[in-house]
Amino acid sequence: MSDARNHDVPSGLTRHALHRWPKIELHRHLEGCVRFETAWHWAQRSPDLAGLDQDELRRRIEFDGVRDFTHFLNRFASLRQLYTCREAIEQVAWEAVEDAAAEHIRYLELRFSPDHFASYAGFDMETVTLWIVDAAAAAARLHNIRVRYLLTIARNYDEQTAAEILSIALRHRDRGIVGLDLAGNELLYPAVPFAALFARAREEGLGVTVHAGEAGPAASVWEAVEELGAHRIGHGIRCVDDVRLVHTLRERRIALEVCLTSNVQTGVVPSLLDHPLRRLVQAGVPLTLCSDDPRISRITLTDEWRNALDLGLSLEQIVGFTLQAVEHAFLTSAEKEELREALAREIRALPVNDPSR
Ligand SMILES: [Zn+2]
């Protein structure tokens, strides 16, 4: 923070200037990272997608203007149908990392559900997981970005699938799998049935993040905190409705992964200007800015920084979120220290007097 504060930040920062700042991304779904041209290519091999024209494919897999939570989640049902072969899965994983590096993201926690990529072709979830992490790791080495992985369990998964995903995570921690995520429709499926599974994940040293308080109420965030022991909350914005919850998140240092555009597109806030980001910041809730599903939403993390500025936050505050994200990353203390120093070095080296800033 102190490094950023030394800079005189002009108002009207362009997207171009923001693009150059080093970033951290803690909430990004591989499922939502598919470039359209890549989707189009592999759709030709999918029995369910091959007959579509480009406009129709786009309507199915990207935000189409309908601001509705369930409708947004339906994008994932179509995206699943892309994965008919190993090459498609590896390409998507590779490109997700390449895209993140191009946004100057220096540390990425990329999350995915093995079932999402495995089910259409009937692949084994563990095999698919290794295809993904190996392809992503190769891209990470090439593009000089640190990547870790969270495995996602959707709330509608049966007990056996959920247990298998945890086992895969535990068996392959040496490949950079550092956490478990609970996602899906919190309006239809409670988190409580997964309490024992997430307790085991925590005991084994995995980080735990839970999508809650997005379309659901503050009570859903309480459930994530009290029943699942979440270290971080995906979205969690409805905590603003509950003073005691805000206090608890602050006291326990549980960070919200805030995704502005996603919240508008899923209709959980009526518009960007209605987003409670500033109230959350004023209340002292730890948080970090994230992009959720950049290719579905057709945004980058840079766009989300711009949106935060439009909501009245300063660049210092946004850079502060980035440094705060280091604290909440599922990394060891030594790795965090190294990352913090690397970010500070890079921020110091940004050309202060560059007119493009
Ligand atoms: Zn998400």
Image (spheres, grey):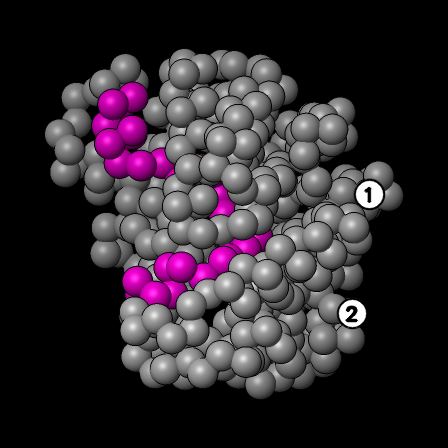
**Residue at 59% over, 61% down:** 345
Image location (x, y in percent) of residue 55: 14, 38
Can see residue 237? no
Q: Is 197 placed left or right of 46 in the picture?
A: right
**In this view of the protein, can residue 101 be seen by the observer?**
yes
Q: Nearer the viewer, residue 250 or 116?
A: 250
**Residue 322 percent across, percent down from the top left:** 57, 64
Specify the label residue 205 is tagged with: 1
Left or right for 197, reference 104: right
| Amino acid marked by disc 1 | Gly
Q: Is residue 28 magenta?
A: yes
Residue bounds of the magenta highlight: 15-43
Amino acid carrying label 2: it is Arg
Give the residue number, with chain letter if any, for mark 2: 252
Counting other residues with Cα less than 10 Å from the Cα at mark 2, is it few (<14), some (14-19), or many (20 or more)?
few
Residue contact at pointers 2 and 1, CB within 8 angstroms: no
